[in-house]
């Protein structure tokens, strides 16, 4: 019994450490963002998010809009970081262009070491909106169109084969070319929180004992662009982008980048 208790304690400690790693990455990234934050003006205040739940879990190339879902993360330079409502830019078309090109200009002016630092990047995924937003050092860069798991039921992934896309905070832990999907950016699903939830479901006998958490979840391209164009969720749980877009993300995003997936 003592030996079992010791093993259980060791497993619990390991899960705690694995849960803390994404949280530390998130905190470090947020501190970088905070250092660059420009306070909102009285005319265009940044909306607060009282009911944030982090971590929980448009057309390609379209820009972020002022109507963003609240997640409780701070904003930088008046642009929403991971979902806060940004100040609305002035009506001037020139000002609007500057607003959306700001992230691209920051990236163009960055050195190679800064671009290779995963703490400078963040990805925010909105399943309901079919969008993947990319930020660099708190500056909005671009929105990409995406489709997700083909399950008929909403919610986060719970076990292998349920056809759902995970929800929560993850890290890119690897990337490699794919013959079928152009590129595959591997996420660390299941993380410690996913494993804990899966264990609870199994203990409550809400899922068959033979099921497993699953794995091999990531962001990849498509071998059937018409499904992506039609907003048809067809994957077994991954996030699928257009092939041109996944090639760009594979080039930009370093291993270790934070990816937050929301409903």
Image (cartoon, helix red, strand yellow):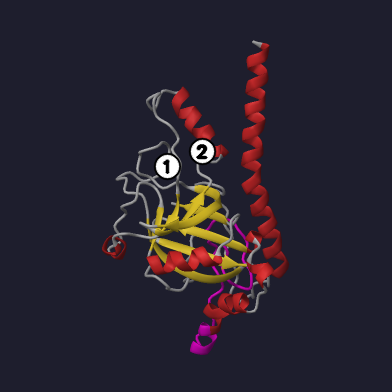
Q: As displayed, is residue 121 above or below residue 89?
A: above
204 falls in the magenta region: no
Observer-nearest residue: 6 or 142?
A: 6
Whether pointer 2 and pointer 1 mark residues with C-beta atoms closer than 8 Å, the reply is yes
- Looking at the rendering, the stretch of residues picked out in magenta corresponds to 70-97
Q: Residue at x 66, y 75 (%)?
A: 110
Q: Is residue 82 visible?
A: no
Q: As displayed, is residue 160 above or below residue 179?
A: above
Observer-nearest residue: 237 or 253?
A: 253
Residue 117 sits in which quadrant? bottom right
Q: Is residue 205 left or right of residue 21?
A: left
Q: Which residue is mark 2?
A: 194
In the rendering, at what x and y percent does residue 248 appear? 48, 68
Which quadrant: the N terminus?
top right
- Is most of the magenta stretch helix, strand or loop? loop
Q: As displayed, is residue 218 above or below residue 196?
A: below
Q: Residue at x 65, y 45 (%)?
A: 21
Q: Which residue is mark 1?
A: 157
Task: Tell me the distance, in whole angstroms, between the alpha carbons under discs 2 and 1.
Answer: 8 Å
């Amino acid at each position: 019994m003592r030996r079992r208790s010791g093993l259980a304690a060791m497993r619990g400690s390991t899960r705690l450490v694995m849960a803390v790693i994404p949280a530390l990455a998130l905190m470090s990234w947020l501190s970088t963002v905070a250092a660059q934050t420009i306070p909102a003006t009285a005319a265009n205040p940044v909306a607060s998010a009282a009911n944030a739940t982090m971590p929980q879990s448009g057309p390609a190339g379209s820009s972020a809009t002022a109507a963003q879902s609240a997640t409780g993360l701070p904003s930088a330079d008046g642009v929403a970081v991971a979902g806060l409502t940004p100040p609305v830019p002035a009506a001037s078309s020139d000002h609007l262009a500057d607003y959306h090109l700001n992230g691209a200009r920051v990236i163009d002016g960055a050195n190679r070491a800064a671009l290779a630092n995963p703490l400078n990047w963040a990805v925010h995924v909105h399943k309901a909106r079919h969008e993947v937003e990319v930020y660099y050092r708190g500056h909005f860069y671009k929105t990409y169109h995406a489709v997700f798991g083909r399950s008929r039921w909403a919610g986060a992934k719970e076990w292998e084969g349920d056809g759902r896309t995970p929800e929560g905070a993850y890290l890119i832990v690897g990337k490699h070319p794919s013959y079928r999907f152009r590129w595959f950016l591997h996420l660390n699903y299941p993380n410690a929180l996913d494993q804990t939830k899966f264990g609870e479901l199994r203990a409550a006998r809400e899922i068959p004992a033979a099921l497993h958490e699953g794995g091999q979840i990531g962001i990849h391209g498509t071998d059937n662009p018409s499904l992506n164009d039609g907003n048809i969720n067809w994957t077994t749980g991954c996030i699928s982008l257009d092939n041109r877009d996944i090639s760009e993300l594979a080039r930009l995003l370093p291993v270790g980048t934070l990816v937050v997936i929301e409903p």
